[in-house]
Amino acid sequence: MNRLAGKSALITGGGGSIGLATARAFVDEGACVFLVDLDGAVLARAVDELGSERAGYAVADTTDSDAVAAAVAATVDRFGSLDVAFANAGIFGTIAPLTEYPAAVFEQVLRVNVLGSFLVAKHALRVMGSGGSLIINSSVVGLTSDARIGAYATSKHALVGLMRTAAKEMAPAGVRVNTIHPGPTDNAFQSAIEVEAVGASPQESAAVFEQMIPLARHATPEEIANVVVFLASDESSFITGQLFHCDGGMIM
Ligand SMILES: NC(=O)c1ccc[n+]([C@@H]2O[C@H](COP(=O)([O-])OP(=O)(O)OC[C@H]3O[C@@H](n4cnc5c(N)ncnc54)[C@H](O)[C@@H]3O)[C@@H](O)[C@H]2O)c1
């Protein structure tokens, strides 16, 4: 219950499925959380649920450097420090072969997933001290890929390079940096991808994806959050520069 006692955390995409599940788990473990996302009403509801004593939010686009810097400063102002950052905001783009992939969509996916995570790293790492932990949400397709997901897979692979660079730069300061690589997770983000890829109902499309997962099911957002809690906590104090597969065995 107190694995994150005394820590304060910034979570981007904090209004979304994995981000909010992580915020709940962090608060349950004694942390204070500051959520960043695009929709103020969603964030206000999340903070209501989490309790305003230990949760705050900022509406910010993670591709806006000044907005990310302000959210980091607001976290420190509100809670006194920034110990954990979860660079989690992300978008998928579309499904198309590279020869047909719209360049504007490719650019936007890289902006949000790569530039956005870089800006979280840039501003959060400036204020994190020894014991700090940056966790970057990549994907199983940050480790492998499939046809027709060029923008998303490219962006999620790039996050491994960002993580490795940050881990090497920050190790002397005692700050750890790792990526997580979730497989298909049971939420609206993934369901939309599955329906677009398979072209059937959500249930039928999910069943097609489950055939690719050795554990034969989707993750819950809470199962992904559990991995983030571990990486945020001092239980992982000697782990940095690593890639955490949470994919039901898709890559082994
Ligand atoms: N759902 C899955 O199966 C799965 C698998 C692997 C990785 N992921 C990754 O997990 C992360 C969270 O995804 P999720 O499944 O919770 O989906 P989600 O859509 O519920 O959450 C993503 C959140 O990011 C926010 N966001 C998007 N662009 C933003 C921006 N520019 N600035 C600020 N916030 C922004 C969205 O508003 C949303 O709330 C993403 O990076 C996604 O790529 C998801």
Image (spheres, rainbow, N blue to C red):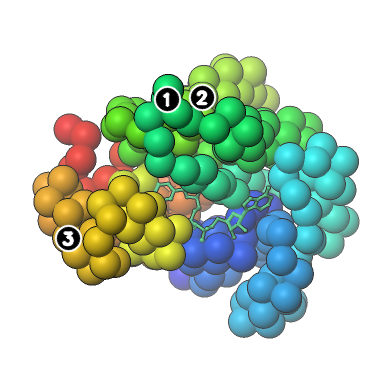
- Helix, strand or loop under label 1: helix
- Badge 1 crowding class, 10 Å Cα cut-off, few under 14, some 14 to 19, many 20 or more, is some
Q: CA distance from mark 3 to mark 2?
A: 29 Å
Please state which amino acid type lies under the numbered disc 3.
Ala
Residue ID for mark 1: 98
> In this figure, which residue is indicated by the disc labeled 2?
158
Amino acid marked by disc 2:
Ala
Discs 3/2, front: 3
* Extreme residue in the front direction: 100
Which residue is drawn at the image coordinates 40% and 41% (left, top)? 95
Gap in Å between the C-alphas at discs 3 and 1?
Answer: 26 Å
- Residue 10, horizontal then vertical, whole percent: 68, 53
Task: Tell me which numbered mark, 3 or 2, is placed earlier along the sequence.
Answer: 2
Q: Is residue 72 visible?
A: no
Mark 3 sits on what residue? 207
Residue 102 or residue 150, whichever sits in front: 102
How far is the residue under mark 1 from the one under mark 2?
17 Å
